[in-house]
Image (tube, rainbow, N blue to C red):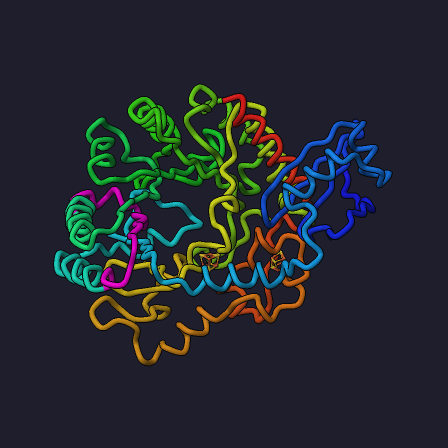
Amino acid sequence: MKIITPHIKIEGYKPSQYNCFVLYEDDSIVVFNFLYRSLLLFDKFEAEEITSGTISTQILQVLINQHIFILETWDEWSFYQYNYLSQSYNVDKLSLAIMPTLGCNCACPYCFEKKNGKSMSLQVQNELIKWVDDTLLTKRSLMVDWFGGEPLLCTKTIDYLSKELQKICKKHGIQYAASITTNGVLLNSPEMIDFLSRNNIIATQITFDGGHTAHDKQKFLHDGHGTYDKILTNANLFVEKFPEQKLRIRVNVSDDNIDTIEELLKDLQPINKHCSLFFRWVYANEASSWKEFSFQSKGDNPYLKLYELQCKAINKGFLIDDQYEHLGFFHCEADNAAFYTIDPLGNLYTCVHEFDPKYAIGDIRTGLSAEKQADYFRFRNATLIEDDECRQCLLLPMCNGGCRRYRIVHKQHQCIYEKQSPELYINMIRRNISLMNVN
Ligand code: SF4
Ligand code: SF4
């Protein structure tokens, strides 16, 4: 598989700057456009036309229809910039990551959750309801992600807040939906599944940390017991009760567990049609005193290993959850100007990775704090617009300039891993789409 640049000429048209042509060993070609996310497959005879530059009218028309070739007068950067900025500064869609607690039933060594067990008091819950009520006056929808700590430690809080927030949305005539990010340990009964339904939780994400033994070494309860068997049983229960909902499974990958992921895939295979997987390196962070968990396995091309895992998962019939597909012109949810993380004390943050009150930009009682106003707008204005490398980047419409927090702290962008091997990412997409068509 290699990236090629064919010399195709179409009168009045130019190639999109976000095209990537990939030539396969069997001489077929796949073209992917990172802006329009169009993917075209050409067999070796059609590929020959493309590489020779002598193309039939039929193929030319397909290239135009799928925006691989665009009108010469079309200014792609302006089009991208307009969409990126209007989405970035749009405050219509209130999106909240609510942490009912920072406490957790697990004691994973790479996580902050065990360091602070605070939960949201009834007073804060009522203040939050009032804040949402006021804030929704100018909004068109509300999306909540129950986050933590382990949110399922606080089912009463979620029940209460969900009921009240849905009432408010009804009053304002706007849509409400929720998701939950849980370690999955407490999803252990039909009652818990009912809990998700009655609270309008339409997407659920759980996490595994590799195969049985490796997982139990990383994700264990405070008494030291491993959680692999529990989470696996619960995943089975979830898909049995919610067959129409795809369970999102995050697989944390590190030096300690990378060789055990196949074992996990084998154990999950019976429910492969009902889940989607995504793989993430366990990264060094403040809570683990910046210990590196994945240094050796990442090597020079960290996407390569993740790609290999993605292919193994696809081979076993799992769909890969590709975050870039549903984020539009955002790099992450924090790019939404109406996104806030709310901690158990009612502090407001711009990003889910800032949960220490020293990073709060305000709180639900008094709103944006005067001292943090500059920080807040620095974050909101940390766009890629002045970044020449991002402006020229093939993967720009997928990465959208990388993490804003990183850009501010390090005064430069942080490229996504896929940038090193776009052809591998495109092959993953191709295989994922084929699997979707089979399913
Ligand atoms: S750390 Fe960066 S990528 Fe992660 S949520 Fe925050 S802003 Fe987004
Ligand atoms: S951060 Fe890197 S990968 Fe992302 S758009 Fe900028 S140059 Fe491209």
Q: Is 71 in front, or is 238? A: 71
Q: Is 275 in front, or is 210? A: 275
With 52 as the anchor, is 281 left or right in this view? left
- Of all residues, the one furthest to the bottom in this rendering is 371
Q: In terms of image quadrants, where is residue 372?
A: bottom left
With 152 as the anchor, is 211 left or right in this view? right
Q: Is residue 233 visible?
A: no
Residue 371 sits above or below residue 356 on the image: below
Residue at figure coordinates x 41%, y 38% from the top left: 207
Question: Residue 242: x percent and y percent?
Answer: 31, 27
Question: Residue 7: x percent and y percent?
Answer: 83, 46
Residue 145 within the segment the image draws in magenta:
yes
- Of all residues, the one furthest to the right in this rendering is 52
Residue 379 sits above or below residue 185 on the image: below
Residue 63 sits above or below residue 317 on the image: below
Q: Is residue 5 visible?
A: yes
Give the number of marks: 0
- Of all residues, the one furthest to the top in this rendering is 270
Residue at figure coordinates x 70%, y 38% from the top left: 61
Question: Residue 57: x percent and y percent?
Answer: 76, 36
Q: Which residues are magenta?
A: 135-156
Residue 206 within the segment the image draws in magenta:
no
Q: Which of the image's four quarters has the N terminus?
A: top right
Question: Residue 58: x percent and y percent?
Answer: 73, 33
Residue at figure coordinates x 28%, y 51% from the top left: 103
Residue at figure coordinates x 52%, y 46% from the top left: 324
